[in-house]
Image (cartoon, rainbow, N blue to C red):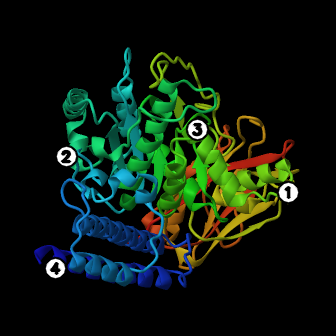
Amino acid sequence: MRLKRKVVAGGVVLVVLTALVLLIATTSQDVTISAEDPLLERQIWDLQGRLHKSESLNKQREDELHALLSRSTTNENGVALGNASNHLLVESLSRFAGGLQVPGIHSYLPHLTGRPEHLRPAFSISQGKQGVSIVIGVPTIKRDKASYLTQTLSSLIAGLNEAETNDCLIVLFIAEPWDIMYAEQVTALVKENFQSSLVSGLLEVIVPPAGFYPDLNNLKETFGDPKERVKWRTKQNLDYAFLMLYARPKATYYVQMEDDVIAKAGYLSIMKTFAVQQKDDWIMLEFSALGFIGKMFKSSDIPTIVEFFLMFHADKPIDWLLDHYLWVKVCNPEKDAKHCQRMIQSVRRRFKPSLFQHIGVESSLRGKVQKLKDRDFGKAGLYRAHVNPAVQLASSLKTYQKYSLSKAYIGETFFWASNPSKGDIIDFKYSPPIHIDMYLFRSGNMDHPGDVFHNTTIELLTPNQVDESVRSSVALRAGLSKLEIDNCSEGFIPIGKFNENGLAQGEIPEEMGIVDTLRIHVHEQLDAWVILSEVRPSEIINL
């Protein structure tokens, strides 16, 4: 009788949570998100986090209901029970819970039915951190000769500043459920070297339960791979599936990493900026050219992606499955291979230069050596991207081909213009006016170092009257000559200029008040073309 009450209660909870998730999802479809409003962006991310949490809770209740249903029809030894009332109860609850049995993780891993404990970590160190922008999954496995884990975690953690640390979570997945001693050794190593990151919640450690994995000793050998390799790649697919599903509710984006990489400092803000700037829909963003390193997915897409992996987890390796997933999503069988490749590239987007470098030599597959290096890692970029405030752009310069000012402002490429002349201007108008505390304009790039601004000043227009002493103080601090001050645009205040390296940067005193327009003003005919490779007006946001 007690079991029946539990089953009924479980069914009711599942239906209520399902209705709640559907209500939230339906409501959110009518919301228009503006990535140009940082406060609204944060509110939307918070809403997405709560939605992911609700979905996760709903899935957990569903698993528990499956377990209760299973236990109501079988005893502890798996023998079917013949009690007619039990069967009637199960039949009624099945109809109550939705009728059709939708395929899910139990369809592909049937041994998990009635075993919800095998869908939770067997061991974890976690502060419960959630609601961040990016969660990074780092699976690690025992290697015979070398371990790169400490170097990898050190690089990932050292590459974050304080704000990035608060907006990030790193999940270390020790993929050795049958080797408890090794899992304990790795945990002790992490505690010794990264205790502060564990305490702050930046770093989590989990070990999957052995019961999550099916029998890996009787797999079908395919594609000429030996039995050991088939077992290795199948388990690897399941490792990724568990890690991705565990991490998904914790952040807006999920980034897959490996345990033998180093990272470029500031990588988190670059990834976040690149993701926010994508206008059209995308499936995967790549921040490394190698393997499953630095691959970003939207957390909302993870369930579908993982389900695809689980469908074929024993058939093909993870990189092949990912390629097939993209083909299924966007390719038209009636079109040729070139068209398919273009479609895949439209949703699988690469950021250059690479933010992560592979440092491992010994593979996680025993006996395999792979000396892979990302040739794009460490290269200086042709432009630098930032999330900038909403603006109205205007320029008297002639744009070359696709290198427009608007694309440079949002960080898609650089601005390239031909034949700058005396009196040419570039205006960044903010409507309504905003508070800006600093500015940075970088001209030229690695391929065209000579395409820089010379004898060019930065000017500012405010809607309010600025005291003359403040104007003079700013001009003096910027090192402007009397001629440069006198040649300033009417009504504008000169605040800086490009130096001999083509860089203009400086602070805007609070006394200036809100800014209506920032202007780049050319004062002489330039022999070369000009490139604007970085644009960064830093807005002060009052929370």
Viewer-nearest of labels 2 and 4?
4
Kindly report the distance in space between the C-alpha atoms of the residues bearing marks 2 and 1. Answer: 53 Å
* Between discs 4 and 1, the one toward the N terminus: 4
Residue named by callout 4: 5
Q: Residue at x 38, y 70 (%)?
A: 55
Q: Amino acid at mark 2?
A: Val
Question: Callout 1: few (<14), some (14-19), or many (20+) C-alpha neighbours within 10 Å?
Answer: few
Label 2 close to label 4 by CB (< 8 Å) = no
Q: Residue at x 37, y 82 (%)?
A: 20
- Identify the element where label 1 is drawn: loop
The answer to which of 199 and 246 lies nearer the viewer is 246
Q: Amino acid at mark 1?
A: Lys
Kindly report the distance in space between the C-alpha atoms of the residues bearing marks 1 and 3. Answer: 29 Å
Kindly report the distance in space between the C-alpha atoms of the residues bearing marks 4 and 1. Answer: 56 Å
As drawn, the label of residue 199 is: 2
Label 4 close to label 1 by CB (< 8 Å) = no
